[in-house]
Image (cartoon, grey):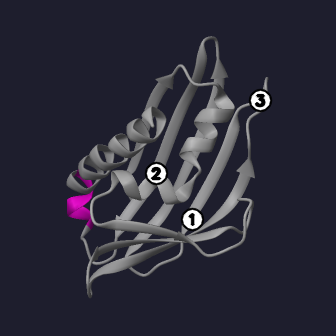
Amino acid sequence: MPLIRIERRTHLPAGEAWRRLTTWENHARHVPFTTVTVTTAPPTRVGTRFTARTGTGRAGFDDPMEVVRWEPPDADRPGRCRVEKRGGVVLGWAEAEVVPVEGGALAVWREEVRVRGVPRLLDRPTAWAARLLFGRVVTGLLKE
């Protein structure tokens, strides 16, 4: 599976950057033709489940995910979250890390992604497209 890594430095405090990156419904504002529905009660924690639905009408697919690691940042410790994809189309995982730094925070998004049925030969273009998409998402969320 292609591994992507996106880093963004922000003036936001680590707690606010964390909140923006882990408010799952807000991701849909930055991914065309996508809605995100959280299917468990708040607050987010290990076991929280949500589904990103991409497409229009009947043409589309669901990307169900589950939070398997949840460690919000504090004044001297980075926050770390890991989400595992539980669907039949998009496979892999995503990790968000928010590190408090002087003047704000460093947000790091790692994702290992594979689309079922896409041959490994296409890993490079898949990684390129994923970097473009998730870079846009992370940048957009931190600027909201």
Local SS, label 2: strand
- Residue kind at label 2, given as amino acid type: Glu
Q: Position of residue 43 (x, y in %)?
A: 74, 60
Tell whether label 1 touches label 3 (CB within 8 Å).
Answer: no
Left of 83 or right of it: where is 91? left
Tell whether label 3 touches label 2 (CB within 8 Å).
Answer: no
**Quadrant location, the C terminus:** top left
Residue for badge 2: 111
- Residue kind at label 1, given as amino acid type: Glu
Taking the spot 24% from the left edge, 70% from the top edge, the residue there is: 119
Inter-mark Cα distance, 2 to 1 = 10 Å
The mark that comes first in sequence, 3 or 1, is 3
Q: Nearer the viewer, mark 2 or mark 3?
A: 3
Inter-mark Cα distance, 3 to 1 = 23 Å
Local SS, label 1: strand
Local SS, label 3: loop
Q: Residues within 10 Å of mark 3 (few under 14, many from 20)?
A: few
Taking the spot 35% from the left edge, 51% from the top edge, the residue there is: 30
Left of 89 or right of it: where is 92? right
Inter-mark Cα distance, 2 to 3 = 22 Å
